[in-house]
Amino acid sequence: MAAAMLERFLPDEAATARLGEDLALALRPGDVLALSGDLGAGKTALARALVRANAGDPGLEVPSPTFTLVQSYDGRVSIAHFDLYRLSSPSELDELGLDEALAEGVAVVEWPDRAGERLPMTATSVALSHEGDGRRAVISGADRAFGRVARSLAIRDFLQQAGIGDAMRVPFPGDASARAYETIHAENQPPRVLMNSPRLVLGPPVKDGKPYAVIAHTAQTVAAFVAMAGALRRRGIAAPEVLAADLDAGLLLLEHLGDGPFLDREGRPLHERYAAAAELLAGLHSEPFPETLEVAPGIVHDVPPFDRDALMIEVELLLDWYVPWKTGHPADAGLRNAFADAWNTVFDRLERTEPGIVLRDFHSPNIVWRAGRSGSDRLGILDFQDAMTGPSAYDVASLAMDARVTVPEEIERSTVAAYVAARHAAGGGFDERKFREAYAITAAQRNTKILGIFVRLDRRDGKPAYLKHLPRIRAYLRRALVHPALAPVAALYEAHGLLAEDE
């Protein structure tokens, strides 16, 4: 990869602190940030700002490690701050624990020239020099770490264009998606949310020459979010207002809908909140939802269909990831053929069900409880960029069998009952029998997919924490598979022991 370079003029200490914050947000374990410049050029000031931002503590004491040579700090990532000015030989880096620091976190290195050839070629360099009353920072690198730094600085430029370039950026905890979010705090203004969602990188073809994301109709740009947010708001639903957007860069500045948890203080589901969310869905499904939405003047988003190919490619994640994990060997051709036959028989029944908007991940992590408000305004809805047109029962199943929290059967039943009652009250010929069949089918489809996704997050992405959810997802599947419409799938899963608890 060819080296790339960026420059920033830092007129004062506040600008240096902002650069430290921007760099901190870009760092990942294994990164090296090499700070060079003459005495007094601002290396320690920049390192101090970076460490404080990473720790989320602007008052953290960060002394220069000139005499200790290395100082370690906890935070979003672990940081080892090296000052090599007094280093006698590059070999002394072994005693200072550079390799150990990189195995666990990040190394920020002042006077990197003293390290000779010992720093990795992937290091990102920041060269500081005096310029007038301020400083100039020249940032260079040739690795993915530099790409993350460049992206972080592009976010700062986006905030500057939105009139809040001095704002403080605080990252959200990581989740299962490729998107990243930050809370943006500008002086004398309410907090906002920054969505960082570059254009989706399509993977290799997996079927019929198409990548998975194309078959599953995963949103490829933030345009889908902007379009859906506007459409939901026009329907009276509390989706975030888009305050600023760079569609090409994949950056959005959003209204902050609050941080009231949808669950109780112990992380348990509350009957009345789940019922309120079900009633919101009933209202959304009682009227047709447009399939073509405006993003901006002259730009539209066509809501894709939740078609047979999308339904099938999702459940096949169970074959690709969960089955090898569960059984110790890949799914063979016989299982794959039987799996396709069983699910196609079930999906045939979905063709007779009511179509509607499917938000896709309508469950507790994506719902904000806004106490003190009334009606649907009590619920802030956060995640809907992958919305499709499909079985309207899907989101009810997503809610009532919440993948991130154990929903007791009585709350599941009351949630579904609240939806059914609201649909009957709205009129329009609601067919409860067909709904309940579609509810069972989509619950089984979704939980089958999630078993595959959670194992993939462990095996491919190094996120083993998702495995703890598997017993809950299997229990949900067993609930759904009781419905007679799912008999072919239930028999197949039973025959192969796919829902047996782990030993």
Image (cartoon, helix red, strand yellow):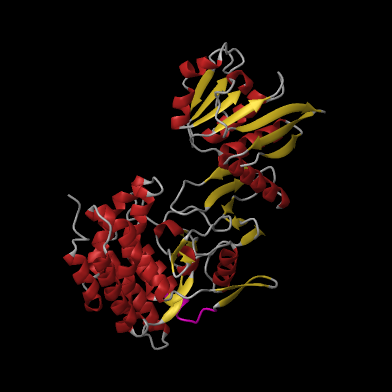
Answer left or right for 128 relative to 398: right
Quarter of the figure with residue 108: top right
Asked whether 75 or 66 is in front, the reply is 66
Q: Which residues are magenta?
A: 282-290
Write the residue at 52% across / 69% down: 237
Is 88 drawn above or below residue 319 in the view shown? above
Asked whether 93 or 188 is in front, the reply is 93
Residue 287 on the magenta segment: yes
Q: Residue furthest right?
A: 132
Quarter of the figure with residue 408: bottom left
Asked whether 60 or 89 is in front, the reply is 89
Residue 159: percent from left, percent from top: 67, 49
Residue 474: percent from left, percent from top: 25, 60
Q: Is residue 188 visible?
A: no
Q: Is residue 183 visible?
A: yes
Residue 303: percent from left, percent from top: 53, 74
Asked whether 48 or 4 is in front, the reply is 4
Is 269 drawn above or below residue 459 in the view shown? below
Number of on-image labels: 0
Answer left or right for 230 relative to 92: right
Q: Quadrant of the N terminus?
A: top right
Residue 357 on the magenta segment: no
Write the residue at 57% across / 40% down: 145
Q: Residue furthest bottom?
A: 429
